[in-house]
Image (spheres, helix red, strand yellow):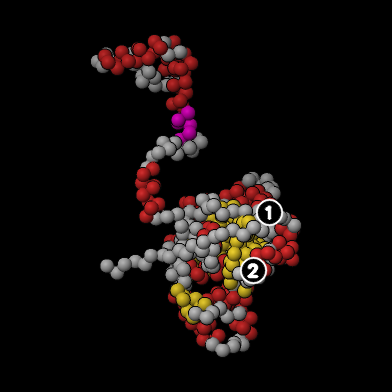
Amino acid sequence: MSLLRAYDRYGFDVSDIYDPDNILDTKKRQLQEEWLDNASLEKIAQRIDDKIEEIKYKYVAEMENDAYQAGNDIDELIDDLLEHPEVGAPLFGPLINTVTRGARLNKFYLRSAATGVGKSRSMIADACYLSCEKYYQEGIGWIKSGGGGEPVLFISTEQTKDEIQTMMLAFLSNVNEDHILNGKYVGDELARVREAAQYLRKANLFVVEMPDFSLRDVENVIKKNIRDHGIKYVFHDYIHTSMKILEEISKRSGGVKLREDNILFMLSTRLKDICNQYGIFIMSATQLNADYQYSETPDQNVLRGSKAIADKIDVGMLLLQARDNDYQSLEKILETNTFERPTIKLSVYKNRRGKYKGIYLWCKADLGCCRIIPIFCTDWSYELVDMENVKIRIAEDSAF
C-alpha cells in the first residue's frame, strides 16, 4: 500500500490495481485485493512501468505498430495468393521473369553494371516494354508488349531528352540507334521508326531529367508523377552522390560530414521506403568497382561506393561482359550447339521471395537496339540450370 500511495502522490493513476474509493463494485474490489495479496512489490512496480513504456513507445519512440498473432488473416492470404500469385508486370526478355517474378509493386530492384555494358539501355527496354502498346520483333513484325500500357516514370541522371528518345525508338523499332542518329536507314527501317514514334506518343511513359538531385527531389518528383499520371513503375538511372545530396545531408547532420557509402545507403533506403509508402515498383542501378573483373561470385561486394546499398533491395543483379575464361568454362554447354554464344552474363546475387540466386543468365546483347536477351542459365560454377521460361500476361479489363 505504501508503494501505491507513493505512485499516487506523483500523479500515477493506480485505480486499476487498487481503488480505495470503490464502494459499490464489490466483485472488482475482491479481485483487486486477491491480486494484491499474491503480487510481489516487483510485479506491482512492473505493471506501472508497463503503462509508462506504452506511452513512451507511442509518443517518444514512435513505435506505433503492434505485434500481430502469427496466424492472423492466414486463410485470407492463402486465398489471395491462389487468385493473385506473387508476380508483377513482365520485364523484357525470356527467363528474366522466371527469376524475378516480374516488376512487383512495393519492391526495389537493383541492376548494376560497369560503364558501357548496358544498364541504362536495359532500363529503357523495360520502361518501353511496360508502357508501350507494341514493339517490333525481327521475323515476326509488330507484337504486343508485355505491359500493354502500364504507367511508367523514367528518371534520367545523365542522358538528355534526345538521347533518351533515340534509345526508345531503337528498342521499339528494332533499328540500330546508329541508323537513327545518322539518318541512314536500310529497307523498311524508317517506316518502323515512324511507327515506333506513334506508340511512344500514345504511351503512359514519362521522363524527368535530374542530373543533380537530393533525396527530397527524388521523392517529390515521384509523388508528383503519381498524382499527375498515376505512375506505378519507376526506373531511376542511377544511384550516385551529387552536390545537392551532399548539401542536403550536411544540413540534416548539422554539418557533420558523412562518408559516401553512408550517403548511398541512405539513398537506397529512401527508395525502398518510397516503394512501400506509395505501393510502387522501383528499379535503379549503380556503377561497379574494379573488383568485378576478378570476382568468381559477383555480388554486392563489387558495387561502387557502398555494398550496403544492396541491404534494402529485393532483387540484386549485375550486368557483366562475358570473358574468355567464361567461354572456357562454358565449352561443354556451347559445344552442343543448343544455345547461341552469349556476350553478356547477368549475375543474380539477391532474390527475396525467389528461389534463383547465385546464378548467371547468359545473354545475347544488341545494345544498338537496347536489347539484352537471356538465352540460358547456369549457377556460378557454370553448371547448367534447367529453368522454365515463365511468361506473365496482364489480364485485360472486360467490356462487360
| Quarter placement of the C terminus | bottom left
| Residue 218 visible (yes or no) | no
Q: Amino acid at mark 2?
A: Thr
Q: Quadrant of the rendered structure where residue 362 is?
A: bottom right
Q: Are marks 2 and 1 in contact (CB under 8 Å)?
A: no
- Residue under numbered circle 1: 297
Q: Which residue is mark 2?
A: 336
| Callout 1: SS | loop
Instruction: Examine the residues drawn in magenta and state their main secondary structure.
Output: helix
Q: Position of residue 29 (x, y in %)?
A: 30, 14
**What residue is drawn where x is 54% and y is 60%?**
387
Q: In the image shown, does 120 or 24 lie closer to the viewer?
A: 120
Q: Dot 2: what SS?
A: loop
- At 53% from the left and 58% from the top, the residue drawn is 100
Neighbourhood count class around disc 2 (C-alpha, 10 Å): few under 14, some 14–19, many 20 upward? few
Residue 249 sits inside the magenta stretch = no
Q: Which residues are magenta?
A: 53-59
Q: Find residue 398 and report its horizontal and vertical position in percent.
A: 31, 67
Residue at left 33%, top 13%? 20
Decide: is 303 above or below 186: above
Q: Tell me residue 12's x, y (percent).
A: 42, 21
**Which quarter shows the N terminus?**
top left
Callout 1: 10 Å neighbours few (<14), some, many (20+)?
Answer: some
Q: Is residue 72 left or right of residue 284?
A: left
